[in-house]
Image (spheres, rainbow, N blue to C red):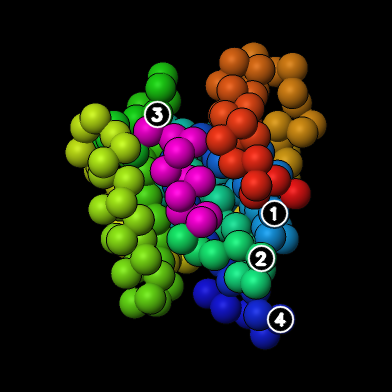
Amino acid sequence: MTSQSGSQTAVLGGGCFWCLEAVFLEMRGVLEVESGYMGGHDPAPTYDAVCNGGTGHAEVVKITFDPAQVSYHDVLEVFFTIHDPTTLNRQGNDVGTQYRSVIFTDSPEQEAVARKVIAEMAVVWDGPIVTEVSPVATWHKAEAYHQNYFAQNPLQGYCAFVVAPKVAKFRKTFTDRLK
């Protein structure tokens, strides 16, 4: 998605949205990150309903970025580095379609880049990449307490043991892409 200001949007799901949000908030060129839900059938999903797995929605982040500072390709490269795209409907102990690896694209150009990056990343991972590539659907912003969750709850167990290592991996691997 391209806005009038020239920014673009990527919608990605790679397990718990807290992990993706925390990493992308630190990436140069990223203007905003929102946690939410996409890809399901419930017209008004809630966190509890999504976590129970019956809505069909994935936990996703909507990343607004400046393409003059960071490309969609680079955003996807980080995405494939900070989550495991080889586990179907699972990230670590989070299991269910709501935790699937998914890229929601809004144009043939985004879809082509997504498929190109998947092919490039296939040599990095031991197993086949199972990331779903689907057209964008209705965006549902997650509840307010999920926004900027890691920054507000760094000592919470999941944040300390799951989110923090992903942020550390991003900082170590992509020093040239830090804000």
Magenta stretch?
A: 74-84
Query: Residue at label 2?
Result: 69
Q: Could you tell me residue 21's position as x and y percent? A: 62, 43
Is residue 9 one of those drawn in magenta?
Answer: no
The amino acid type of the residue labelled 4 equals Ser
Above or below, comparing residue 34 to residue 134 in the picture: above
Residue 166: tell me if it is visible: yes
Q: Label 1, secondary structure: give it.
A: loop
Q: CA distance from mark 2 to mark 3?
A: 29 Å
Query: Residue at label 1?
Result: 28
Query: Residue at label 3?
Result: 91
Q: First in sequence: mark 2 or mark 4? A: 4
Q: First in sequence: mark 2 or mark 1? A: 1
Q: Nearer the viewer, residue 59 or 108?
A: 108
Q: CA distance from mark 4 to mark 1?
A: 17 Å
The amino acid type of the residue labelled 2 equals Gln
Binning the other alpha carbons within 10 Å of mark 2 as few (below 14), some (14 to 19) or many (20 upward) gives: few
Q: First in sequence: mark 3 or mark 4? A: 4
Number of numbered discs on residues:
4
Query: Residue at label 4?
Result: 5
Question: What secondary structure is the magenta-colored segment mainly?
Answer: helix
